[in-house]
């Protein structure tokens, strides 16, 4: 994710002055993005009267150790910047893995022009679908590109050193790779997609003429636009999306991220309710900070989307060379996965 901001007032200023390229759209205006479906945007929460404790939830096996092996496997590639060889290698590994575990994988290919770059760069969102024929679907998502530079390193000379981004994006992919082992037999009647966004942080310039700089979120914005454009031709519909970012460090705490709360309060309530039910201590139903991340574009496209993120708790390694696998814990990934697989079973 790109940054965090604490209040709505600050967000406007920050969005306008600091990010420059990023058009800040408060949720109140967001229904314009999909004018046909504004009232349905939180349709997922039609089940909100369904208390988690009234639903039989089966524990789904999750191998914490193996999830860490996937995390290391991806980090061993080195940086996976959009359009790079490392990214291509990662795509190869991930596509093969999901296909071997029964997913139908679609590459959503596009290209993007970053302000500070001369040329367009090829990008690919990966969509791994289980039960692809089902029209009612939910999405678990994460970005899978790594930032070209470790911009938070205090010594500028370190910015260009290989940045592995273990918990920033990669941890989500690792969790999905482990979850893939259980998906073919998953007890559900809905369709489930794992979506990996490219170009979340293909960012080279963090400042510019108007205090702006490069643009974030190419992948999720392309995905959201495609979803909106195809609304009369596609058969499926996403009822909810859960985004994972900076969640794999031991001792992580997830208060409710405020953009999630504004855009999809019922979904957030449902997710944190089930976390309590399965005794996942890292989820605390409290007001969190406001984060700009890939869930914003999804909400604008009418998909209720929340972000599971502990920015504050990971700040000391965020966009630094120390964002390494050793900062991550398989047990923590397993706890988040446990909430997620319990939540998926609420949908019938
Ligand atoms: Zn990041």
Image (cartoon, grey):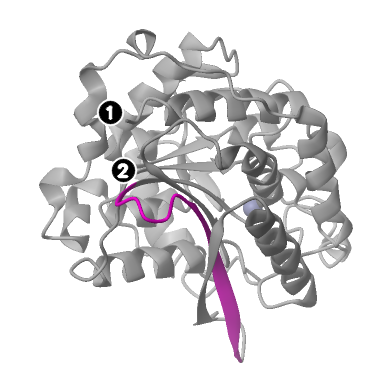
State how far apart marks 1 and 2 are (Cα): 9 Å
Query: Is 271 in front, or is 285?
Result: 271
Crowding at dot 2, Cα within 10 Å, few <14 / some 14-19 / many 20+, comes out as many
Residue at 49% across, 69% down = 218
Query: Is 121 in front, or is 109?
Result: 109
Label 1 CB, ligand 1: below 8 Å? Answer: no
Q: Residue furthest bottom?
A: 118
Magenta segment: does it hold 121?
A: yes
Picture quadrant of residue 68: top right
Looking at the rendering, in which quadrant would you find the C terminus?
A: top left
Picture quadrant of residue 344: top left
Q: Which residue is identified by label 1?
A: 266
Left or right for 150, reference 300: right
Relative image position of residue 299 (x, y in whole percent) = 31, 50
Crowding at dot 1, Cα within 10 Å, few <14 / some 14-19 / many 20+, comes out as many
Query: Is 330 in front, or is 249?
Result: 330
Relative image position of residue 174 (x, y in whole percent) = 71, 45
Residue at 47% across, 30% down = 187
Picture quadrant of residue 274: top left
Cβ atoms at labels 1 and 2 below 8 Å apart: yes
SS state under label 1: helix
Q: Which circle marks residue 309 in the picture?
A: none
Magenta segment: does it hold 134?
A: yes
Residue 130 position (above or below residue 336): below
Left or right for 224, reference 105: left
Q: Which residue is identified by label 2?
A: 304
Magenta segment's dominant SS is strand
Relative image position of residue 331 (x, y in whole percent) = 74, 23
Span of residues in magenta: 119-136
Residue at 21% across, 45% down = 41
Asked if residue 253 shows in the view, the reply is yes
SS state under label 2: loop
């Amino acid at each position: 994710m790109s940054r965090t901001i604490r209040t709505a007032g600050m967000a406007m200023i920050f969005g306008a002055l600091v990010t420059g390229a990023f058009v800040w759209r408060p949720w109140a205006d967001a229904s314009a993005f999909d004018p046909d479906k504004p009232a349905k945007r939180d349709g997922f929460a039609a089940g909100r009267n369904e208390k988690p404790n009234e639903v039989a939830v089966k524990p789904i096996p999750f191998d914490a150790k193996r999830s860490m092996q996937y995390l290391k496997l991806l980090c061993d590639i080195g940086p996976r910047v959009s359009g790079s060889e490392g990214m291509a290698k990662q795509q190869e590994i991930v596509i093969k893995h999901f296909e071997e575990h029964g997913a139908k994988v679609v590459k959503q290919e596009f290209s993007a022009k970053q302000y500070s770059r001369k040329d367009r760069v090829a990008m690919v969102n990966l969509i791994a679908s289980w039960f692809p024929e089902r029209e009612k679907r939910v999405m678990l998502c994460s970005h899978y590109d790594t930032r070209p530079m470790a911009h938070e390193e205090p010594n500028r000379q370190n910015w260009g050193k290989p940045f592995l981004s273990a918990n920033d994006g990669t941890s989500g992919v690792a969790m999905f790779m482990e979850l893939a082992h259980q998906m073919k037999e998953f007890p559900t009647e809905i369709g489930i997609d794992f979506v990996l966004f490219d170009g979340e942080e293909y960012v080279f310039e963090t400042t510019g003429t108007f205090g702006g700089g490069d643009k974030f979120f190419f992948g999720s914005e392309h995905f959201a636009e495609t979803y909106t454009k195809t609304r009369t031709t596609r058969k499926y519909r996403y009822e909810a999306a859960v985004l994972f970012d900076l969640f794999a460090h031991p001792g992580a705490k997830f208060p409710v991220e405020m953009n999630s709360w504004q855009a999809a309060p019922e979904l957030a309530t449902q997710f944190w309710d089930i976390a309590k039910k399965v005794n996942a201590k890292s989820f605390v139903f409290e007001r969190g900070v406001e984060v700009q991340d890939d869930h914003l574009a999804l909400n604008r496209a009418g998909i209720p989307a929340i972000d599971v993120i502990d920015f504050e708790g990971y700040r000391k390694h965020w966009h630094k060379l120390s964002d390494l696998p050793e900062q991550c814990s398989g047990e923590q990934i397993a706890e988040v996965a446990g909430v997620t697989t319990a939540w998926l079973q609420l949908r019938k």
